[in-house]
Amino acid sequence: MKAVALCMLAFVLVGRTTGDLQPPERSYKILVLIPVTFKSHTIVFKPLLEALAARGHNIDILSSLPLGFKHPNVTEIYHDLMQKHKHLDDMFEFRKASAGGLEIFKDLLPGLAKDLYKVPAVKKLYEKRKDFDLIVTDHLFNEVPFITVAPPGMDHRQSAAFGNVLNPSYAPTFLGSYPLPMSLWHRLMNTCIHLWIPFIWRIWFVVPLVQKEISAYFPDLPPLLELERNQSLTLMNTQFSIATPLPLLPLQVEVGAMHCRPAKPLPKDLESWLAGAGSAGVIYFSLGSIARSETMPPEYRQAFLEAFRRLPQRVLWKYEGELEGVSDNVRISSWFPQQDVLAKEGKVSSPGGLIKLQESIFHRTPFLVSHLR
Ligand SMILES: *[C@@H]1O[C@H](CO)[C@@H](O)[C@H](O)[C@H]1NC(C)=O
Ligand SMILES: *[C@@H]1O[C@H](CO)[C@@H](O)[C@H](O)[C@H]1NC(C)=O
């Protein structure tokens, strides 16, 4: 009952973009907790928070990244602890790590749990906690219940916490998927991954270490894994048409691609540079917001530079920092207006994360994918 009521509350709060809903009965005070977040996660949160603010609700956001709100009823509070606990820069190294990259959380999360409550603004929020009507938080990095948003989409570990244990013979994990229908070997491997992730998360090094730090501050707090089960609604950044269709509970709601929007005009110089590509077209190459190109091993970097040099197309390469030996048909920048670039005619996009996949589909951009398994 509680879940149904909260689902209804969420729909009433958010409303539909077409605006045909009744206005909310009153302005709610909403606390958004994303103290450990990445660019791709804030992209998923932003349209939800914009819709809530547009409906007259008051929102306080605790985040590790600015979301750039200018709305009078939205207050953003940042901490810069992610700088201090810098563990996420080198994705090329993490690939080799034994826990499939999950090691990054081993130091990051307990470290943050320890330092976060020392930040005065965070303490103040904690003291004000009874003022809020609802908490919205990230499903993965913040073990606090209520409504969660799951930027990677379906997470079988989270689903199991609700009682919806997914079948490893066909349900992928967020670490990757095997071609369907899976062979016997793939099913076996997939089952191991299904067990391996919760083992790392719940038993080995994530939750136990975070629990230790948090219990030191809040000895009366119930166990985090119990709190996690009390989530009332989760908004998942996925959609069955571009993912494996899975059985869902009423509290698991798919909202994939809600951040996608029609294109805005490009900056003049970029627009004319792209137009200069003529009929050959343009390739957009970006490794996403977490993998920084600077950490790319030199031999990969060289291989890309040489491959791009031989192409008739023009290439936009999202690359942070200086790069030598760039050919004339390549333009590098640490940031491009990705959705607006993808929306232009005659583009092909490189593989990337879920966000880029959704934007490519929304803007009908062909997407190049490499299969690594
Ligand atoms: C801000 O919130 C108040 C209620 O606290 C509401 O009356 C007002 O309309 C909101 N402002 C905007 C611009 O939505
Ligand atoms: C979970 O929710 C139930 C029902 O609202 C409540 O009785 C229980 O104390 C909650 N458990 C935790 C760990 O918050």
Image (spheres, helix red, strand yellow):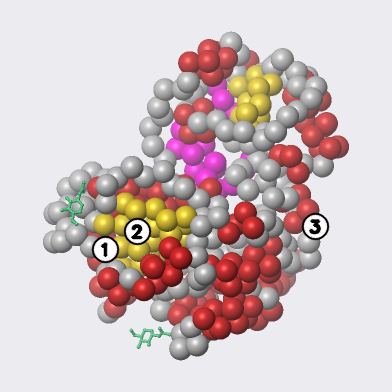
Circle 2 — which element? strand
Q: Residue at x 67, y 56 (%)?
A: 86
In percent of width and height, residue 179 lies at 66, 55
Which quadrant of the picture is home to ligand 2?
A: bottom left
Q: Is residue 253 left or right of residue 196?
A: left
- Tell me which numbered mark, 3 or 2, is placed earlier along the sequence: 2
Q: Nearer the viewer, residue 53 or 83?
A: 83
Residue 60: give its label.
2
- Image quadrant in which you'd find residue 122: bottom left
Report, in whole angstroms, how far the alpha carbon at label 3 lies from the one at label 2.
38 Å
Labels 2 & 1 near each other (Cβ < 8 A): yes
Which callout, 2 or 1, points at the residue further toward the start of the chain? 1
- Which residue is drawn at the image coordinates 52% and 81% (left, top)? 217
| Residue assigned mark 3 | 96
Secondary structure under tag 3 reads loop
- Does residue 225 show up? no
Q: Which portion, as a residue range, is magenta?
A: 346-363
In the picture of the structure, the residue carrying the numbered disc 1 is 29
Give the mark, 3 or 1, whose residue is nearer the N terminus.
Answer: 1
Q: Secondary structure at mark 1?
A: strand
> Going 46% across and 22% down the picture, which residue do you hit?
266
Position of 361 relative to 317 (above/below):
below
Other-residue count near label 1 (Cα within 10 Å), few / some / many at <14 / 14–19 / ≥20:
some
